[in-house]
Each structure stands twice: as C-alpha cells, then as structure tokens.
Image (cartoon, helix red, strand yellow):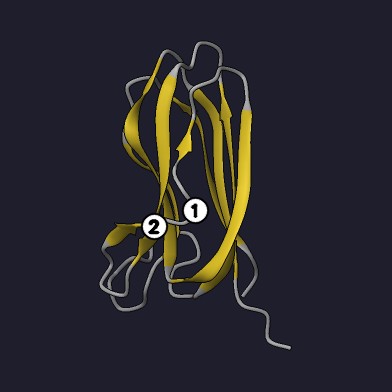
Amino acid sequence: MLAVYSYKTNVLAGASGAVVTIGGPPGLGLTNLVGAHEMLQTIQYVIQTGAGVSAGVVSFQDIGADGTPRTLTTPVPVSINQASVVFSGSFTGLFHGITLNLTTALAGGNITYIEVRGAPPSHA
C-alpha cells in the first residue's frame, strides 16, 4: 500500500471534534475513510493557523480494531494558540487509523489547512 493522506481547509472558529481521519480497521464498514483496512506505521501532520487564532487543542486518536477512536498520550496534544503559524510533526507506532481531533474548540480565527499523512510498515 502507498502512503495515504487526508486534509481539510478553512476549519472555522468554534469548531471541535474530529477534523481529519485516515485509515480504519477492516470489517467495520469504514470504507469512506482514506486508506481504510491497512495498518499505518509513520504518521505526519501539518496544522496551519489563520489570522486571529488564540486557542485550540488538537489531540491524536488511534482508531481501535473495534472502530472506536481513543486519544493517544504520545504524542502530546498540540496547543494551537498562535495566529499564522505552522505546527507540524511526526510519530510512529502501529495504527489501524488516526484522527486529528479538536479537543478544545478553536477560538479567534480559523485553521487554514490541516493534513494528516500515514505510511504503512516497510517490508524489507
């Protein structure tokens, strides 16, 4: 399987909950998710805030084998409390899927771009 990604533009102030999701376990009818049914190992994310953003927290959720998203403690949630800044990073593990979730509502402005990418384990 090739790397997968999902993105969204213009997430408005006041938004909360799941923003973008990739992957998902087989057998749960999650075929609408980008990259469903494949395990992912390397995850990268990019969050670009717009003018006026003053508060918001993005957490990372693993989609379990039962289809339930569970918040990860590593990596730690990203506080997006600055306007016109790009927050990015990566982490590894073995995941059915990943959701970027606004656990604290976005305040003061919008997210102009948010993306999550995932790559499967390499088989050497």
Instruction: Give the SS element for disc 1.
Output: loop
Q: In which quarter of the image is the N terminus?
A: bottom right
> How many numbered markers are drawn?
2
- Mark 2 touches mark 1? (CB < 8 Å): yes
For label 1, the residue is 75
Q: Nearer the viewer, residue 78 or 19?
A: 78
Residue at the spot 31% in from the left edge and 75% down from the top edge: 65
> How far is mark 2 from mark 1, CA to CA?
7 Å
- Residue 92, quarter of picture: bottom right
> Is residue 60 shown above or below 66?
above
Residue at the spot 28% in from the left edge and 67% down from the top edge: 67
- Residue 17, quarter of picture: top left
| Three-letter code, disc 2 | Leu
Instruction: Give the SS element for disc 2.
Output: loop
> Is residue 33 shown above or below 39?
above
> Is residue 63 shown above or below 25?
above
Indicate the position of residue 63 as horizontal and vertical percent values: 35, 64
For label 2, the residue is 72
> Is residue 68 shown above or below 5?
below
Residue 121 as seen in the image, left or right of residue 95 = right
Indicate the position of residue 54 as horizontal and vertical percent values: 45, 16
